[in-house]
Image: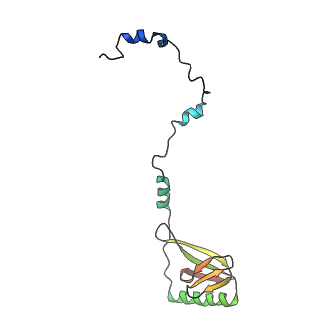
Amino acid sequence: MTDSLWDPEVPRKYRDILDVEWQGVRSHNRANALSRAAQFSPFAALVGFDDEISETARLTMDRIELSDEKREEIEIALQAVITGKQEADFTFFVEDSLKSGGSYETARGRVVKFKEFEKIICLEDGVFIPVSDIVDIEIL
């Protein structure tokens, strides 16, 4: 069997199409340059890798250990806002669900409910705050 590129029969077999200029696919419109270039654009070979990098770079804070004096100060302020229905700013720790640590958030409002057994306060806008996570209360 001979190689078809050097086979002397190839020119004879395909002489009717060898010198015909190719006109492209006639049933489709020619794509614009941007569409043709899109096939060479980079793609994300590692799907989700950028998200993992961003998550690793995201910083969290450690929980502050409060002194006994500060804890007592918070208890006194908490009793005042629960009984007096006063508005206050509550700064509390929120545990991060994806990595160790978390962040500190501040919520403003009045305490409408105190769940004594769970040690959780509920503000008028529906925010629930565990008392053990509160690091500061500023009565307004």
Above or below, comparing residue 130 to residue 13 in the picture: below
Q: How is the image coloured?
A: rainbow
Location of residue 134 by image quarter: bottom right
Residue 86: x and y in percent read 70, 85
Residue found at the far left of this picture = 1
Residue at the (59%, 79%) spot, across then down = 129
24 lies left or right of 3: right
Front in this rendered view, residue 21 or 52: 21
Percent x, y of residue 113: 65, 84
Residue at point 50%, 58% (across, down): 54
Question: Which residue occupies 56% across, 83% down?
Answer: 131
Residue 78 position by quadrant: bottom right
Say which quadrant the C terminus sits in.
Answer: bottom right
Residue 15 percent coordinates (x, y): 45, 10
Residue shown at the point (59%, 81%) measured from the top left:
136
The x, y position of residue 81, in whole percent, is 66, 87
Image label count: 0
Relative vertical location of residue 27 with respect to residue 17 in this rendering, above or below: below
Quarter of the image with the N terminus is top left
Residue 21 or residue 58, whichever sits in front: 21
Q: Nearer the viewer, residue 26 or 127?
A: 26
Question: Relative to the observer, which residue lies in front, 16 or 94?
Answer: 16
Q: Is residue 67 above or below residue 125?
A: below
